[in-house]
Image (cartoon, grey):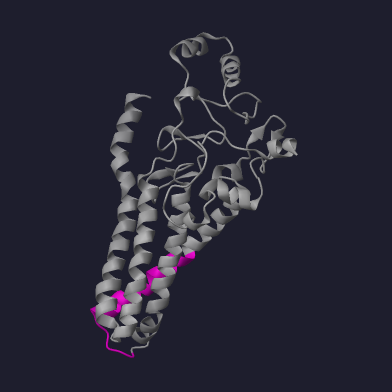
Amino acid sequence: MAPSDSLVRTFIKPLAWLPVIIINAIIVWSYFAYMVVFGFGTVKDTTERVIYLTLYNPIFIIFMVSYWRTIMSNPGRVPSQFYLSAPDKERYDSAENPQAVVNELGKNLPIQTRSISGGARFCEICQLIKPDRCHHCSVCNSCVLKMDHHCPWVNNCVGFANYKFFFLFLFHGIIYTCFVSLTTLKYFLKFWQAAVPKADSSLHVLFLFFIGAMFFVSLWSLFGYHIYLALHNRSTLESFRPPVFSNGPDKDGFNLGKMNNIRQVFGTKKSLWLLPIYTTPGNGYEFSSRQQSLNAV
């Protein structure tokens, strides 16, 4: 990497946290607005208040844990056996046909997918033979196992090791925004129709409903797409560019059937599926393919 590129990355890196700061500022405000302004100010009925606040807090907590586990979790780094050793790197650099060296080394690795040209996939930047479903992230400047996409709202790649957390972040975000919108709807309508006097508290409730409803709709559009991807065992990148196998590109190359596909993300214990606990099976670089399943029949 050129010194100028390194300098630019160093300058831009702190700015990448700006979307995360904005989202967290909105979430912190929503907690204050719901708990203090709405819960203890707007809602006068004690029973109603107890029900709302009792349900609100666990919904908020599981949503925030899912979000921050997506942010802080390593998305999946490539293990050492896929990197070129010093002697292999010398061979690669001095070879007339570097791809032939990569193909030879790839025979000793558990890879099924190929490049468009039919050879083993190689990352020039990381100097490694790419495992199946692995891609290089230009933002993180590293290869990520089963990379789905780089998400600016979490300032992290979404990959093999944190895809479940990202999926739950969307799911619990929908539950959270839906709950906030529904419980504030009655009071939103009252304030909107001027049935009660306008005050600072009413503005908080108005914004709670508007922002909750807006995020509910936007999260659902993204969540619906990821439900589709999970059911078909595809990443976002694979939905745009199908993986290439020895017999050519196959968008359903890793599709093992809907229930098996779900287990590939969430594991076998259904009681843990909706909890932000790591249950994703496998190592992130070896995957069962549809062709293997057909051959085994």
Instruction: Name the one closer to the observer, 181 or 167.
Output: 167
Q: Nearest the camera: 168 or 277?
A: 277
- Residue 211 within the magenta-colored segment of the rendering: yes
Q: Give the answer, above or below, for where 76 lies relative to 18.
A: above
Residue at 62% x, 52% y is 259
Horizontally, residue 77 falls left or right of residue 57, namely right
Quarter occupied by residue 207 = bottom left
Q: For the magenta stretch, what is the residue range? A: 195-217
Which quadrant of the figure contains the N terminus?
top left
What x and y, as percent, mark residue 122? 54, 25
Q: Give the residue drawn at x 49%, y 45%.
A: 280
Q: Within the magenta stretch, is there residue 200?
A: yes
In the figure, 89 relative to 184: above or below? above
Q: In this view, does 34 lie above or below 164?
A: below
- Check the image and name the residue furthest to the bottom: 195
The secondary structure that most of the magenta stretch takes on is: helix
Residue at 41% from the left image edge and 68% from the top image edge? 177
Residue 275 x, y percent position in the rendering: 43, 56
**Where is 286 relative to 48, above or below?**
above
The image shows residue 297 at horizontal and vertical percentages of: 75, 39
- Taking the spot 43% from the left edge, 33% from the top edge, the residue there is 77
Q: Where is residue 26 in the image (x, y as percent from the top left)?
A: 31, 62
Residue 178: quadrant of the picture: bottom left
